[in-house]
Image: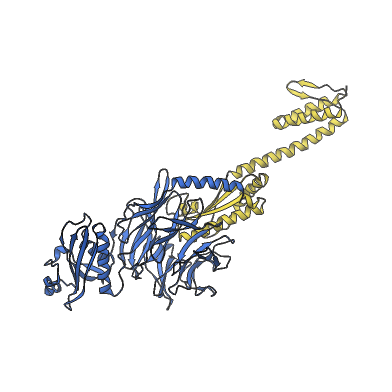
Amino acid sequence: MKMTTPHKLVALIFAFGLMAGCSSTGDTMDQDGMEDGSGSETTSGQQGGSTVFGGDDGSGVSSSEMTDQQRREAEARAERAQEQAMREITTFYFDFDTSEIKQEARDVLVAHARFLQANPGQNVRIEGHADERGTKEYNLALGERRANAVQRFLVVNGAARGQTETVSYGEEKPAMMGSSESAWSQNRRVELMFQ
Amino acid sequence: MTNRFNLSRNRLLTLVFVMMSLLATPAVGNELLIRITEGADSAIPISVVPFSESGQMPAEEKVSRIIQNNLQMSGEFNPLPPEQMLSLPSEGSEVFFRDWRLLGQRYVLVGQVRNEGGTLQAQYELYDVSQEKRLVGATASAPASASRSLAHHISDRVYEAVTGVPGAFSTRLAYVTLERRADGPLYRLQVSDVDGKRARIRLESAEPILSPAWSPDGKKLAYVSFETGKPAIYVHELASGERQRVADFSGLNSAPAWSEDGGSLLMTLSKDGNAEIYRMNLANGDLKRLTNHWSIDTEPTYDHTGRGFFFTSDRSGGPQIYHKASDGAEPRRITFGSRYNARPRTDSTGDYVYYVHQREGAFNIARTNLKTGNETVLTRTESDESPSLSPNGRMLIYATESGQGSVLTVISAEGGAAYSLPASRGEVRDPAWSPIVR
């Protein structure tokens, strides 16, 4: 008895689902599928924990598509995982009296921007800070300039402006107490607060 | 802004207002402790003879003792300790000039205080020793509970008679204290006498309070508070405790500075993209934009004419002081001596502009003579901020770092160190010296 086209589709989707669930055994499963596919008559059922399905010429083509799809999915997953790991970084540091986004912050901010683009319901509060040196009001403006630089970067890379809100605390909320370059460098920063 | 933000903002607002107490009846603040660090070499020798007293005296310090401390703290006087005096006269007929000449004194203040039904009546006389001449003979009174006010008033009269400049002992200081507690920071806006006594809390918040500025009549303070989660400018009437949020635009609302007539405020807003200086008419809220540059423009303060203003701008690459002679005038750069010069303040004569100045990594208070362009660094500590001039132009208060955090230091406007005012708890910053109110 041959499977009708809708049945084949269901079987395929089922197989993808399994593969997505356990990518490491994907190759074996694929081979299983090939073996079963070699028989002209289809037997559907469970064989040693694998889902076995057979089919005619169409199944060979399907099998090849699955490999591609699988690779793409794996790549996408890896990329998502990398972006997710990058998105755990939410603090970005600046040099004294500058608001220039450092090179190493750019990929991370792109990841945040993509996440915001993919999640339009997600908002972010961008908090700008300065170190204690210099005057409070100038530092308030400097903190804002830093927050604005990050906001512009997020928007250019896909976030909607309406998802972002900036506030500057100037030198009022140091991340680290103390009057040393190591404390100051921790305090010249922008923090992203997702809410 | 999306609805979502408004919702969370409102919730935040409610929370903050619960945490924040707005004090209509001012609570007693933590007084600042005075530490006299240095006297000026040229200090004038003066003897403040302990006043004779009759009737019940307040438990406070004695009136003549407060006067003696005031003159000492000004840095311009060197009062003789009473134990070194040869006699203790309380009226002119008892003053023997030869005795005071022997002690090298130039001036002698004598007087009496009586309590008459809860009112302190003071009668006092100031003598010039070398000319053997009475310079002041006057009476003054105050409720017994206000003996400090009485002492400050007499100090002002003595100071003016000797120096020719009005005294500033009856003026007030506004400042912000910060206690870093286990459950978070506590900011307090306080007002005290210039000797740090009689401190009263005017506003308490878990969020930063910045940049207090006195109205010209001494009745209101404008300041920046983050109590809603972002900076906004408030005008706070001290007697009633009533206040108004006058500027709450998107972005920065900061650096308020009063006009001479008290009718408007200069302020820094970034609602149009970046930090620019505006003037707000307080009667109707109208705004006029006064700067237009892609750089940071902030920290405005009126000049002595009341028409132009000084401000900080980094249009040349780093922060520098600029002056605009009128609304329409081109900004003129004032400071060139180093890479970082910010937050100008000027005196009533218009001779000098005072500001924060960075040189070799240290931040100090410096001033530039506006006629000659000469710059003088006035302080020797390392992290000096927020200079504010006394209304008579003779003293300067600023915030600086000590071992325990920020303290206030008062120096003479020429730079001699006079006294420091650490908070008894936590840090104290952002001082603002009130005008003289007669």
* Percent position of residue B113, x then y: 18, 63
Which of these two is toward me, B233 or A44?
A: B233
* Percent position of residue A126, x then y: 56, 51
Which of these two is toward me, A104 or B122?
A: B122
- Please tell me the colour of chain A: yellow
Q: Quadrant of the C terminus of chain B?
A: bottom left
- Please tell me the colour of chain B: blue
* Percent position of residue B60, x then y: 23, 56
Going by the image, does B99 lie left or right of A170?
left
Whether A176 is drawn above or below B48: the answer is: above
| Residue at the image point whose x is 49% and y is 75% from the top | B325
Going by the image, does B134 lie left or right of A12?
left
Q: Quarter-wise, where is residue B364 in the image?
A: bottom left
| Residue at the image point whose x is 66% and y is 46% from the top | A120
Which of these two is toward me, B166 or B120?
A: B120
Going by the image, does B149 lie left or right of B190?
left
